[in-house]
Every structure is written in structure tokens, then in C-alpha cells.
């Protein structure tokens, strides 16, 4: 059944209603020419049907069905009846900056149980969103994915009240690559006043790229396409040819970067003028509650990929560069000596170095600056592949967050099927969802006694497993060894390397 028309700044939209919920899918928030900043869509006057997800952003596996010009859309789920403006979850999907889309995340269950308004977005991916060409005769081609997300956030802030949402209670959230974008976006003056809380799940250790690295990627892509003398020609090259060239360059370049990826938000001096961690450290965001989370066995998925992901090699190389070969061997020996029966000590060391420790460092920066911050780790193994065979690896928390209890949802873009949940899945997922919705509503994921803020000296870490419990982050032989090796200073050097 169709909804009544809802006005927006560009024209009225209609969605669908079901089981007390309204869903508006494929709502255009902007349009864009290739390698140009997004602009508002052409306004319309007749109610626009927004009943199906919009076109995917062009990406590997979906180049034939993508719409490059019209992929900038968002999706909204909102309860039909609410006696007050509802808090809003604004979610940025992950996918290594090259895959994914809002269509993989059905927010109906979270919206109903909040109650809350849930928004997922599309943004440009791969070369179309992250290839920095502003030094190559395409003036606006820098951090386009970031400016896409800013445009979506601006649209939501301006329009969400018409959908029952509270524009003064927007939580900026994301997972993986989306979490990196959240950390960058949260620090931008352009986003100030448009969100009130931030949630980042599994942000990689290196959340921002250097301008020199981005320029080198662009130069090599132009060389690969034989367009060095005419860079503007890249704006009209066929998508399959463009993405194939980027893939070839990426395979050669990945080992040369600290993160093992060639794309990401870039410290370009224009859109992103400051290193995000410096902004957190100086207290500019002390009024923004922050939740940082990761999965226990983040690196398993990347170790088991064929071939193993480049971030495996680059992380080991960066640790060796920071502590020397002797420091690396000492760390690995400690991890072997303290490993669980089902734990790969090499994977655990890399997960700590690339995922867990950088998130803890960011938590310390925010806490030291006077900000409220909570730190969590997801230790539950969902009964869904790839987690059933790989454990609580990258994305395990995300699968439970978006589940429609008692079932995991399908992920059509990633071509992952959902399925029934076990009682343990339901128990952990319900706790995780409840914490998220409490954070979106109040700015704290739990009552203080059950999950205290992250503060020195105890540094509490919430473990989502059976049972939910709190452990001190800075206890144990591994933490003591990192501290002994001078981890804080060396971690900073590792982030600045590459």
C-alpha cells in the first residue's frame, strides 16, 4: 500500500506501508556528472514513487546494472505512528570503498523496535568516488564520496522532520569503509551541527590517505589508460575499461600502502583539511558521544581470502618497521604463548595492530579531550557464513545489527543469503541492537553500571558474547608487552608511515 505524499526540498515522495512502518526507497538526494561534485537533483512537482531501491553505484560485478548519474539516493524507514520526533540513524555502508550500497541494509526492524528513523545511503565508489584528479585538470575531483555523504547528511538534516525524524538527534554511523568515512565526516566543519552522535564499527587503522598517495594512484591510473597527456578524457572512458585499469593498478599498488587498499578519504587540504585524529584530540568534538567497535577476529576473513589481502602483508611490515624484527618476533611469541585453543596467534596480532589498537587510541584521544566514548568488541560467532566457518571476523557485528530477529537478512549487492538465527544469535543480536538504539536515543549505549564510559585508568571494554560482560582493556600479557615496546609512540609512527 502506498503512503501519503511527503514533501521534501526537491518535491513530494510516496513510499509503501506495511506492518505499521513506512519505507521510502531510492529517494534522490543529488545527481552528479563523472568526477564532479554532486548537485541537487532536478525538482519535481508530482508525487514521486520511491518504492524500490535506487540504482547501485557502479562497482565490480554490477557495472551493467548501475546508473552512474542517478546512483545518489537514500532509503528511509519510519514508524507510521509516533507521538514525538524520533531519533535518526544515518548509516554509511562499507565495502573497502569499492563495493556495497544502502540496499543491503533493510532498516525496518530497527525502526520498529527503536522506535527510530533509519536512513541508509548510496555514495560513489572506487575510482568514481575516490580517485583524486583535482591535480590533473579536473578541479572538483577530490574526495567525491565524502562530499556525496555530506550532501546526503545535509538532505536528511533538512528533510527528516517530514518523515517523523528529529533533525537535532541524528547519529552518524558506519561500518568498515563506512566507519572510516564517519570518522572523517565527524571532524568536518561542513558537517557541524548536522549530527549529534557518532558510531564507527570496524574502522581500519589507517582511516585517511595522504594527498601524495592519492596523487600517485591517480597518476598510475592515467598511465594505465594512456591518458597522461589528456587527463580530462578519463571522464568519458567506458566504465568496464576504467574499472579494469583501476583493478590492475590496485594489485600493483596495494602492497605499497599502509592500509593495503588504494582508496579512502584523503587529507587533501580542501574537503578534509586536518587529520581527523588531531581534531578529536584537540577537543573540538568533546560534545559528540562516540561509540567505537570491532570484531574479535577481524583479520581471519582477509587471511582466508585468495590470495590473502594485501593488508596482511602491509600490517606485518608496519609492525616490523615500528618495533624492528626482534620486536615483531617477541610480540608473536607472546601471542603464541597466550593464544586460546581456537585462536591463530598471527591473526590475533594483526587484528590488534590494524583494528583494535587504533580504535583504542582514538577512544583515548576523545576521552582525554573530555568526550564521552564507549569501546566494544564483538566476540560472538553468528551461525551464518562466512562467520560460521571463520568465527567473529570482519562484519560479524554488522550481520547481527541488521538482522530481523529471528532471521539474518539477505544482502543482495554482496550476494549473501540470510537465514534463521540460533538462540545464541538472537540473544547477542538483541543486546547489540538494544545498545545501538539506546545510543541513538540517549547518547549512551547502556546504563553506566552495566557499561561504563571508556576512561583511564580502567579503560572498560564491552564484550558482546554470551554473556555480555566488561573487561579492562589494559590488562593481560599482550597489553603489557605493547606498552613495554612503547606502543603509543610507535603506533603514531605506523599511522604516519607509508
Image (cartoon, rainbow, N blue to C red):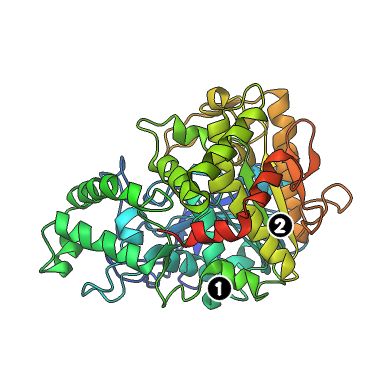
Could you tell me which quadrant the C terminus lies in?
A: bottom left
Mark toward the start of the polypeptide (2 vs 1): 1
Residue at position x 67%, y 34% from top? Answer: 379
Is there any visible trace of residue 47 in the rendered image?
yes
Residue at position x 37%, y 53% from top? Answer: 257
Residue at position x 27%, y 62% from top? Answer: 216
Q: In the figure, residue 218 lies in which quadrant?
A: bottom left
Furthest residue to the right? 449
410 versus 255 height, above or below: above
- Describe the element under mark 2 as helix, strand or loop: helix
Question: Where does the image place residue 93, in percent across and percent down from the top left?
Answer: 50, 50
Residue at position x 71%, y 42% from top? Answer: 432
Q: Is the residue marked by circle 2 packed among few (<14), some (14-19), or many (20+) residues within 10 Å?
A: many
Question: Where does the image place residue 107, in percent across and percent down from the top left?
Answer: 59, 47
Question: Where does the image place residue 348, in percent across and percent down from the top left?
Answer: 58, 36
The residues tagged by marks 2 and 1 sit, at their Cα atoms, a distance apart of: 18 Å
Horizontal side, residue 488 vs residue 152: left or right: right
Q: Find residue 440 and name its label.
A: 2
- Describe the element under mark 1 as helix, strand or loop: helix
Choose between 49 and 121: the one closer to the eye.
121
Choose between 22 and 153: the one closer to the eye.
153
378 versus 235 height, above or below: above
Question: Where does the image place residue 10, in percent across and percent down from the top left?
Answer: 45, 71
Q: In the figure, residue 38 lies in which quadrant?
A: bottom left
Residue at mark 1: 191
Q: In the figure, residue 443 lies in which quadrant?
A: bottom right
Amino acid at each position: 500500500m502506498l503512503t501519503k505524499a511527503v514533501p521534501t526540498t526537491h518535491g513530494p515522495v510516496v513510499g509503501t506501508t506495511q506492518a505499521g512502518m513506512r519505507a521510502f526507497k531510492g529517494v534522490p538526494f543529488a545527481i552528479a556528472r563523472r568526477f564532479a561534485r554532486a548537485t541537487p537533483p532536478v525538482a519535481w512537482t508530482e508525487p514521486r514513487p520511491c518504492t524500490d531501491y535506487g540504482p547501485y553505484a557502479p562497482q565490480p560485478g554490477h557495472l551493467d546494472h548501475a546508473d552512474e548519474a542517478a546512483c545518489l539516493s537514500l532509503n528511509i524507514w519510519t514508524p507510521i505512528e509516533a507521538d514525538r520526533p524520533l531519533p535518526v540513524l544515518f548509516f554509511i555502508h562499507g565495502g573497502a570503498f569499492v563495493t556495497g550500497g544502502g540496499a543491503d541494509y533493510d532498516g525496518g526492524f530497527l525502526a520498529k523496535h527503536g522506535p527510530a528513523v533509519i536512513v541508509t545511503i548510496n555514495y560513489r565508489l572506487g575510482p568514481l568516488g575516490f580517485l583524486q584528479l583535482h591535480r590533473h585538470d579536473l578541479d572538483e575531483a577530490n574526495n567525491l564520496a565524502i562530499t556525496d555523504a555530506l550532501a546526503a547528511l545535509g538532505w536528511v538534516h533538512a528533510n527528516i522532520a517530514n518523515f517523523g525524524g528529529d533533525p537535532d538527534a541524528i547519529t552518524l554511523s558506519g561500518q568498515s569503509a563506512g566507519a572510516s568515512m564517519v570518522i572523517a565526516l565527524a571532524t568536518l566543519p561542513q558537517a557541524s551541527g548536522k549530527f549529534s552522535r557518532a558510531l564507527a564499527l570496524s574502522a581500519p587503522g589507517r582511516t585517511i590517505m595522504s594527498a601524495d598517495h592519492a596523487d600517485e594512484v591517480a597518476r598510475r591510473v592515467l598511465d594505465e589508460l594512456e591518458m597522461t597527456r589528456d587527463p580530462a578524457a578519463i571522464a568519458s572512458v567506458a566504465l568496464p575499461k576504467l574499472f579494469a585499469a583501476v583493478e590492475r593498478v590496485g594489485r600493483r599498488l596495494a602492497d605499497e600502502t599502509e592500509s593495503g587498499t588504494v582508496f579512502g578519504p584523503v587529507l587533501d587540504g580542501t574537503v578534509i583539511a586536518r587529520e581527523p585524529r588531531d581534531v578529536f584530540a584537540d577537543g573540538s568534538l568533546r560534545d559528540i558521544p562516540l561509540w567505537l567497535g570491532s570484531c574479535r577476529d577481524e583479520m581471519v576473513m582477509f587471511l582466508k581470502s585468495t590470495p590473502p589481502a594485501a593488508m596482511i602483508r602491509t600490517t606485518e611490515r608496519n609492525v616490523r618497521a615500528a618495533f624492528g624484527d626482534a620486536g615483531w618476533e617477541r610480540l608473536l611469541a607472546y601471542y603464541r604463548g597466550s593464544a586460546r585453543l581456537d585462536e591463530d596467534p598471527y591473526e590475533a596480532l594483526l587484528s590488534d595492530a590494524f583494528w583494535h589498537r587504533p580504535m583504542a587510541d582514538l577512544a583515548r584521544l576523545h576521552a582525554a579531550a573530555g568526550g564521552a566514548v564507549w569501546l566494544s568488541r564483538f566476540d560472538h560467532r553468528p551461525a551464518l557464513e562466512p562467520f560460521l566457518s571463520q568465527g567473529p571476523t570482519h562484519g560479524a557485528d554488522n550481520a547481527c545489527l541488521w538482522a530481523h530477529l529471528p532471521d539474518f537478512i539477505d544482502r543482495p549487492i554482496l550476494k549473501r543469503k540470510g537465514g534463521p538465527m540460533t538462540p545464541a544469535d538472537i540473544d547477542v543480536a538483541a543486546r547489540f541492537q538494544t545498545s545501538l538504539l539506546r545510543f541513538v536515543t540517549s547518547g549512551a549505549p547502556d546504563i553506566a553500571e552495566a557499561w561504563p564510559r571508556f576512561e583511564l585508568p580502567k579503560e572498560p571494554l564491552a564484550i558482546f558474547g554470551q554473556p555480555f560482560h566488561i573487561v579492562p582493556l589494559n590488562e593481560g600479557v599482550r597489553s603489557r608487552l605493547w606498552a613495554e615496546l612503547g606502543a603509543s609512540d610507535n603506533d603514531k609512527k605506523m599511522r604516519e608511515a607509508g
